[in-house]
Image: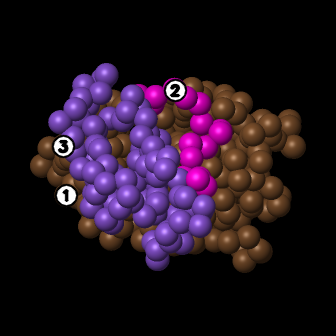
Amino acid sequence: MSKRWVFDEDRCKGCGLCVQACPEEIILFSDRLNRSGYRMPEITAQDDCISCGFCARVCPDVAIEIYRPDGGRKTENSRDGGR
Amino acid sequence: MKAVYEKPKSLTDVVTHYCPGCTHGVAHRLVAEVIDDLKLEDRAVGIASVGCSVFAYDYFEVDFQQAAHGRAPAVATGIKRVHPDSVVFTYQGDGDLASIGAAEIVHAAMRGENITVVFINNAIYGMTGGQMAPTTLVGQKASTSPAGRDPDHSGSPIRVCEMLSTLPGVAYLARVSCHDARGIMSAKRSIGKAFQTQLDGEGFALVEILSNCPTNWGMSPVESLEWVKEHMVRYYPLGEFCTPGEGE
């Protein structure tokens, strides 16, 4: 299965707003630094992602893209996510 | 896989110069999403201001003109009148719009120019190093008000939307906030309405976006958004102040 949470690490500035926005609390800071020296977030469990898009929406650097499998699991949060 | 969220086409691939956690990036993205949604890529003309958003022309995949400090509404007026088919928007911060450009914005609104203004209010001068702005809250510390803004000495902050709402030429006025995902979605709706107001030829439209400045406020990005929610939204109430048709 391809990924729900697609992350462009070179755009990330390590602000952590996605970590805070994730309702499932599965985005956490990793120990890795990107090319600019920012500490990057990582998703701990792709399968637990509900594709709500909150992290992408709060990301000031457009570093996150969100996908949902066709006919995949939908949640209450995901209703507004695609707007 | 179906895309729930992808980078808007009207944004370039350039990584912005904004500080980590600055919601200028969010506001840029929302404007780009609206340009995409309304299919205005070929018609949109942006006017960049002076301040942190001075490089906006590098970040949008549409025509752009840089204006002198505060004069974006005047430049927008010229472009819109010469090219009435274009969709003209300015992107201005509070130092640009509410301070040096206060006259331009008031008079563009008074004339009811058919332009869209995206106004970022982060209650401080960001680019020049965190000086007090006309929008700095009472008690808020800035490099030129180290003990906090004193209303007896510096007056009280300008509420731009309320001030402009008295002018008959104004068609759409809204204040939104970027402090959480819900606020961001609502901000996008308001920016969309502000562009639609211009497309419908209704007149002047302005969206004020409450924003943060983690660097000059001396906070983490997460703390700064909490501060927007706790303090800025209290002084700058959210909502629509004018909608097309009601002012006439």
Q: Tell me the distance, in whole angstroms, between the alpha carbons under discs 1 and 2.
A: 37 Å
Q: Is residue A39 visible?
A: yes
Q: Which lettered chain is shown in purple?
A: A
Q: Are marks 3 and 2 on the same chain?
A: yes
Residue placed furthest toward the top: A35
The quadrant where residue B232 appears: bottom left
Q: Residue at x 12, y 49 (%)?
A: B147
Chain in brown, by letter, is B
Asked if one can make out residue B144 in the rendered structure from this viewpoint, the answer is no
Q: Which label was assigned to residue B14?
A: 2
Extreme left residue here? B147
Front position among marks 1 and 2: 2
Which residues make up the magenta segment? B1-17
The residue tagged with tag 2: helix, strand or loop?
A: loop
Looking at the image, residue B203 sits to the left or right of residue B144; the answer is right
Position of residue B96 relative to residue B17, above or below, is: below
Q: In the rendered structure, which disc, 1 or 2, sits on the residue that comes first in sequence?
A: 2
Look at mark 3 in the image and give the residue it sits on: B218
Estimate the x, y position of residue A64 in percent, counting from the top left: 45, 44
> Marks 3/2: CA distance?
27 Å
What amino acid does circle 3 point to?
Gly
Q: Which residue is mark 1?
A: B139
Q: Amino acid at mark 1?
A: Gly
